[in-house]
Amino acid sequence: MTPTRLVLIRHGHPQAYIDQVIPGPKGCTGLSDVGRAQVAALADRLGRTHELGESPVLVSSVLPRAIETAAAIAAVFDHPEWDQHCDLCEVHPGDELDGMGFAEFQERYGSDRSSVFEPWGPGAETWAEFVARVGRRLLALVHEHEGRTIVVACHGGIIDVAFRVLGHVPLGRGVNAQSAFTSLTEWVAKGDEWRLVRYNDHAHLEGTPEPHA
Amino acid sequence: MATTRLIVMRHASPRHVVEGVWGGPTADKGITDEGRREATLVGRRLARAPWAAEVTVYCSTLARSIETANIVAREMGLAEPAHDCRLCSYHLPPHLDGIAVEDGLADQIPGGGVYKPFERGNEPWISLLARSGEALFDIAQANVGRTAVVVAHGEVVQASLVALGELPIRRHFANGNTPTGITEWTTADDLFDTGYPEWRFPAWTLVRLNDAAHLEHLEHLDRLEPA
C-alpha cells in the first residue's frame, strides 16, 4: 500500500499584513508583491524537484491568499481546478472583526485570551472550535484520498492543528512553531502512525525578499 | 535579547547501516562516499546563512558524527568541532556494538521501553534523553546570541523535541531523520533566568525540522527511512 502523504503549504505573504487588517473573508485581499515572488519561487522549486509526485490531490481554503497560492501550485501540475473548503480557513474572526485594523483591535479588545475555549474577540471562533473543524476536514481528506499525495494550500493555523490531529500534541500547549510563507510541512501515514517527515521547509526562499514568516 | 540558535542534525549516511549492524564505538566505521557528499552539501548550504560567520560546531565521539562535523566545519570555514560524548546515539555495551540489526531486535527484553532498556545492558531512552538534553542546554548557554551547529544522531534530534519543544518523553508521532536534515531551534529568552523564585524557563521556537532540501538528488522515499 502506498503511504498517504499530507503536504501542508502555507500561503505567501498577504497584502493584509501590509495593510495591517484582520484577514478574514472581507479583510483578505490576496498576496502582496513579496507573497507573489514567494509563490513563484515555490512553483519553480516544485517544477524542478518533482517532490510532490506527478499528480497530487490539491485543495485549498476559500481565502484569496490561499487560492492564489494554490493557483501557482496547480499550474505546476496542470490542474485547472481544485476543491476549496472553508473548513481549511484560518481561525474564523467573525463579521465584526473581519477587516478591522490591528491597532483598532488592540485598542478595543487588548491582548490574548489565555483559554483555548474562549474567543479572542467578539464573534470569533475559539481555538478548540478551530481544531475540531480543521481536524475533521484533514481526516476526511486523508480517508477520501488514501494512498495519494494530498497538497493543502492553507494557513499557519492549519499546520499547527495538524500537530494536534496527527501528532497527538496537547490541545493547549504544543511545540512553539512559526511556519514560513509558502513553507512545506509533510506528514506521512505509516500504518496507524503518522511520521512528521519535515516541518517548515522553506529552502526556496533563500535569497528572496523578507519577510519570510 | 539577541537570538540564540541551535542547528541539530543527524550525521551523514553511515557505513555501519550498509553493513547491517549497530554502530557503537567499535563498529562505527564513519560515513560512506554518498555521506561525504551529503555533508559537503549541508556545509555549503549552512555557509550561506546570514549567521554563518560566528558558529561553533559540536559532534559526538562516534566516527560518523565526527567525520560529518569535520566536513561541515571545513565547508563553513570554521574551527574543528568540539566533541561531546553526551551527544552520542545509544551508548551500546560491547556485546551489542557491531551486532547484526536483526539479532539485536530479536533479543529485546520483554517489558523494556522508556525507563528500562530495550536490550540487556543497553541505555534506556530516558537516560539518553537526560544526557543529550543537558548537552543541548550547555551548548545553548555557551553560545548565547550566536549559533551552534550540533552534528549528532537521530536520537539527539528527537531529544531536542522533548528538551526544547517540551513534547512528551514518548511522542505519539515519528519524525523524519534524513542524513544531514536540518532541524533549527531559536530563542530570544534569557537562558539563565530560570528556577526559583519565578520558575521561568526559556521558550524555544521550532524553525524547521528535517529540512533536507540540499539533497534534491535523493529519491523522496529515501527521506522516510528512520535513523
Image (cartoon, coloured by chain):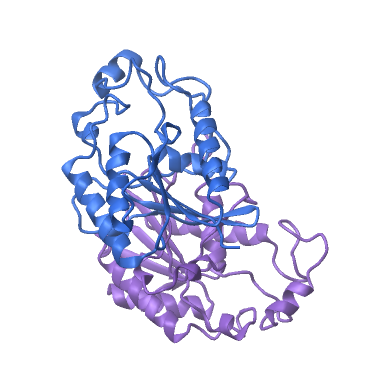
Q: Quadrant of the N terminus of chain A?
A: bottom right
Quarter occupied by residue B149: bottom left
Locate residue B130 relative to residue B151 in the image: left or right: right
Position in image of residue A40 (x %, y %): 23, 53
Chain assigned purple: B
Figure check: B51 above or below B195: below
One can see residue A40 in this view: yes
Q: Quadrant of the C terminus of chain A?
A: top left
Figure check: B100 above or below B111: below
Picture mark count: 0
Q: Which of A197 and B129 is in front in this view?
A: A197
Position in image of residue A206 (x %, y %): 25, 59
Q: Which of B124 and A25 is in front in this view?
A: A25
Name the residue rendered at 34%, 59% in the picture. Answer: B147
Q: Nearer the viewer, residue B71 or A6?
A: A6
Locate residue B115 relative to residue B206 in the image: left or right: right
Quarter occupied by residue B19: bottom right
User: Furthest-right residue in view?
Assistant: B110
Name the residue rendered at 58%, 80% in the picture. Answer: B17
Name the residue rendered at 29%, 26% in the picture. Answer: A22
Chain assigned blue: A
Locate residue A100 relative to residue B18 in the image: left or right: left
One can see residue B202 in this view: no
Position in image of residue B81 (x %, y %): 40, 73
Position in image of residue B39 (x %, y %): 39, 76
User: Furthest-left residue in view?
Assistant: A33
